[in-house]
Every structure is written in C-alpha cells, then in structure tokens.
Image: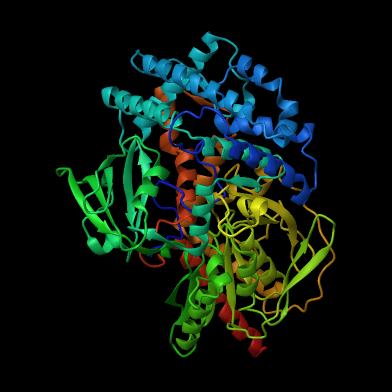
Amino acid sequence: MNRSMAPSGRLRILLLLGLFVISSVTIPACADPVGPSARDRQIARTVAFLLPRRHLSQHELDKEMSRRAFGLFLKSLDPMKLYFTQADVDRFAQKQDELGELAKQGDISLAYDIFNTYLKRIDERVDLAIELLHQKHDFTVDEEMIRDPDLTEYAKSDAEIRDRWRKRIKFDLLRLKADKEALEGKEAVEKLERRYTSYRTRMHQTDADELLEMYLTAICEAYDPHTSYMSPETLENFEITMRLELEGIGASLQSEDGYTIVRNIIPGGAADKDGRLKEGDKIVGVGQGPDGEIEDVVNMKLSDVVAKIRGKRGTVVRLEVIPADGGPKKIIDITREKVELSDSDADGEIFEVGTKSDGSPYKIGVIDLPSFYLDMAGARMGLPDYRSTTRDVKRILEDFKAKGVDVVVVDLRRNGGGSLQEAISVTGLFIDRGPVVQVKDSDGHVMVYEDQDPEVVWDGPMITVISKFSASASEIFAGAIQDYRRGLIVGDETTHGKGTVQSLMDLGQELFRIPNAPKMGALKVTIQQFYRPDGDSTQNRGVLADIQLPSLSSHLENISEADLDYALSFDRVDPAPYRPLNDVDQGMIEYLRKRSAERVQESSDFQRVMREIKTYLAQRAKKTITLNEEKFLAQMKELNADEKEEEQLEEVAGQGNDGIQRDYYLDEVLAIAVDMMNYRLLAQAR
C-alpha cells in the first residue's frame, strides 16, 4: 500500500478516521421522517437515563446540558446559518430548556419539528439558489462574504436571506473557476444546480434512525465531543472498522451528484480478482443473485447502496455500471467474498540510508500504524486468527530483527486511536513490564494499566512520528514511549489532545439482557480520563514532539481537541512508579534537533511548506473572503487554504496505494534515525 508521508492530491472521502466532520449532516436514507416510533422513544429514554449515570462528569441532564444540546443540533444541521431564520430559531428555543426532560420521557418531537422545518427551508433555499444561478452576477464589484459563521447571526428577513445566498452563489461560482477543472459559464451553473438539487433530494431521504442519531448525538455531545449515540447501521460500520474485515465485493465507494462512484478497488478483494469494475465507474443499479431485478440506485443514499452491495460471502451481486472510460452501460456480476481492509492495518517496510563505518547502509524499519484495531468479537470467541494490532506489529518487528534492522520508526500520523487494550500491549512490545497508562473514573479512583508481559520484541533504537491527527490510543503509546525515554518523538508540535476513554454500550443488550436482543444501536460514552505514567493527562495538550518538523497540519484550525465544543479540561494525577530506560537523553535530543534544523533550512521542500504555512495563516486570519473575481483568483493562486486543508486531511486519511512512499518528510525522519545511530556510537566511544 502506497501510504504517502507528504501532502498529495485533494481530499475525496474520509472513510475510517473518526476525528473530523466534513459535511454538515450525515447523508440520509429513505423518506421524510413522519414521527418517532415506540422504539425510538424507548431509545431516547434509555440514553437520557444512562448519560448522567455513566458519563465521567456525572452531570445531570439539566437545563445547561439541554441548552448545549439545542445549540449543537442546530449547528449540525445548519453550520453556516444559510437555512434557518432567526424567527425559526426563536420558535425552537421556546423548548430548549426542556430538551433533557423531554428526552427522559421519550419525547423527541422537537427533533422532528426542527428537522421538518429544515427540510422546508432547504426546498425554499434551493429554489432561490437555482433562480440566482441563472441571473447575471457582477464579479468586478468589491464585496465580501463572511467566512466564520460565529461572526454572523441567522437571517432576519427575506432580503437578508436573498443577499446571503447571492453571495454564496458568487463564491461557489468563483471556487469552480479557481478549481483545477476551471469551470465557468453554463458548465459551472449546471454543475452547481445538480449539486444543490442532489443535496435537497438526499436530505428528503433522511430516515427516522438517522434523525434519532443526529438528535441524541447532540444531547450526548453536550457532555463532551466523544460521547455519541450510534444507530444500528453506524454500530455495524464501527465494528467492521475495528475488525478490519467485511463481506462484500471489495470496493470503496463515494457519492457525487446523486451517483455512487467507485473510489478505489481494495487489493485482493472480489472486485479486484474479477477485474471488470474500475475506479471512477458509476454504479446506477444493483441486483441480488444471478437473476434478481436490477434496482435503480441513482440519488440513493450511499450507505443504502453499500448495504445492497454487501452480503454473505459466496452470494452473487449484479451491478449496473456506467464505465469511467465512457463506454456503454453494462452489467457486472461479482461473487461476494470476505474483504480484509488492509489499508488500515499495520504495514512495514525497510529503507537503506546513510553509511556505517564498514561502508554498509543503515537499515531503518518503518511501521505505518493507522489505528489500534482489534476484532473484539473474534477475541471474545477465542478465534485463533482474530485481527489484532499487537499481533501484526509483533510479526513486523520479528521480520525486521531477522533482516538486521538498526532503527524502528513507528508512524502514528494518521492514527486516530482505537483499542486501549491494543495501545497497552503494543507499547509492551518495546518496554519490559511496567505502567503504560493511568485511568481515572468518575469517583476519582485511579487505576494503573501495566504491560505485564516481560517479553520485549524490539529493544533497539526507535522513533515515533506524530501529527495533530494522532489521537487517543496513539497518544497513550507516544506518551509512554516518551516518559520511559524509550524513543524519540518527531513530527508536529503536539498530538491531537484526546485524553479520554469511551465505553460502548449495546442498548439492546442493556435493555433486554438476552442473546440476539433487538438492534437498538449503542451509546458510546466517556467513562474515564487517561494519564501518562508521569501523571500528566494528554487531554487538550497532547504529547509534545522532541523534534518538530514543519507541517501545515500543525496549524490547521478546528482540528485539535481544544478546538472542539465542550471538550473536557486538562488535569493530572500522581506519577505511577516506573523506571525510565534512558535510551534517549536531553543531550541526544539537542544534537538531533540541531542537525535536523540544519537540513530543514537547506531543504527546498520544507522551505516550500514553511512558505505555505505563512500564507495559509495570513489567509486564515481574514474574517471575510473577497467576491471580486480578480482578487479572489489571485488569492486562490497564491494559496487555496481550503485545498491545503484537504491535502493534509487526505494525507492522514490514507489513500491506500502500494507500499510506504518515500518522500521528503520520510527522508528527514530517516536522516534523524541515522543521526541517532551515529550519536549512540559516539556516546559509546566516549
């Protein structure tokens, strides 16, 4: 798998990274929700009952939490304040203080009132947008659009709505012209009309499960940004992510203008073996079995299309496809198989760099670790081959040792977390017995989780690479490695700063406590805060790098934990009893930092990144964006800030090509590894 370590291309979709909200609402399902079912009311009551009892804060679902939830729900639907009016919000707000009490009674009628109004406003705004699209706009006038919705209020009049959308249309037209395809005129108008119309269609397909998930998640996120309600469908996808396998055809899909498009083909999957389905193909129909009727899936919700394509291994699915190469429409029949999601598992590769005293090169083993995954169901059942990060990393390390690797690099830059258990056991591959993480619960009790396995698979030099996207379990690993002075931390200034532990409660099991309980989704609730062996929390602060490398991701806004609404505060506990290994000392860090800084100054790639950072920060500081075409295109040519954000997000999301890609960023990490070996040799000689 080609896992790039530097910016490459534009963001197309984030499949498995659970840290960033790219669109305002979850793309929806069947028909306009008409009202909550008895099951929905039961789920709401259960969530409202469990939240204050299980959450770390033990805060009651009171007026304060109700107001938070109200604001979060509106923000999730209309983050740019383009749809609701101030009058709408004032009417909704009459019940904002009661939201929690209503949920305790199973009353979620407010969600339906707000969402049905939202659908009505979408219809009105899309009609207005299409009208404005077909009007002539003056792009020579000097006017601006506010970029930050926190600096504006909801529209109070039809004239204000019209003016806000007029500016939005101008902005969208300018963006298309500034984009790589440089669309303008009739083509641009048609593309935007399709986009707006498709959005309206998709929103009207929202089903009750999705609305319930959005509403209850707003209530949950009033407690902290990592507490949420998962619908049965979301829970299933989460479990697939953790076990890194599913049954289907082996293709990643995305939705664009109402079409389901093949984003990539997963190596080794059924579609890859069949060979007929290609990247960029549009799937317009799906049929079950060799003779099943082909069902039209144009304008269907992406997850519904995915559900139709997935199925038990050995069964046949038939796809009606419009080929990306412009060929005639065709039917492709594929037999489903087990698909291993190898893009998200540990991958290792050895690079030869530098020169030893005997003239041979150093061997640096790089492990790309996108998540701390664990097939929880397989582990519970005692399956001998269940998927585990620890098993995979141990296998890679043993291969490295057999091939004479000198330094191991663990790359966590796109690692958003995962299993706490796996973070502890993977850390144990690099240290002897001892505390890895401390955990404090709602009663203030502190528990120390230790690596109890005396085996150390790799005791040689190591480097851990981090980014602002490294979160949660990856921060446990990096924090322990740093506290033990076991290895060097290189990368962004700090990690994400998520220092909390979540528990997943299956609501069907919680309510009925029987095998095969009804599927009611799950409550993911923050139950603990974790701390490094030295007693510091990573919450809001993260793990600081020993050596920083220039990266735009360090400067992206609304990415780190501290940027999120209602994130819990930093605190600390007493240090756990541990013995530093002192494989890294301050003298080594200063030496390596100085050597790296000299190379960065001489690197044209890093100097380009530093110029981009400077320009990006200047663009970001502006509270408005010009709608004058000449000025707009000049700014976008200098640096399209949004595109830079997308490039960084795409980098950490991982695009799943073949092999770990060698680039300027990896080259610098490898150079630091060589310096580390040379420093150790000098220290031994002294």
In the rendered image, the vertical position of residue 107 relative to residue 461, given as above or below: above
Number of disc labels: 0
Seen at 17% across and 46% down, the residue is 330
The one nearer the camera, 655 or 110, is 110
Left or right of 51 on screen, residue 17 = left
Q: Is residue 282 visible?
A: yes
Q: Position of residue 461 (x, y in %)?
A: 59, 79
The colour scheme is rainbow
Q: Which residue is farthest left?
A: 328
Q: Residue at x 62, y 32 (%)?
A: 73
The N terminus sits in image quarter: bottom left
Image coordinates of residue 494 in percent, x first then y, are 64, 56
Q: Closer to the camera, 622 or 379?
A: 379
In this view, 205 is above or below 331? above
Q: Nearer the viewer, residue 685 or 298?
A: 298
* Quadrant in the picture for residue 678: bottom right
In the picture shown, does residue 178 fall above or below 342? Answer: above
Q: Could you tell whether 416 is left or right of 539 in the image?
A: left
Report the residue at 75% width, 51% height from top. 54
Where residue 483 appears, as percent x and y from the top left, is 72, 70
x and y, in percent, of residue 366 in the image: 49, 72
Residue 12 lies left or right of residue 515; in this view the side is left
Judge whether 632 appears above or below 132 on screen. Answer: below
Which image quadrant: the C terminus? Answer: bottom right
Specify whether residue 82 is in view: no
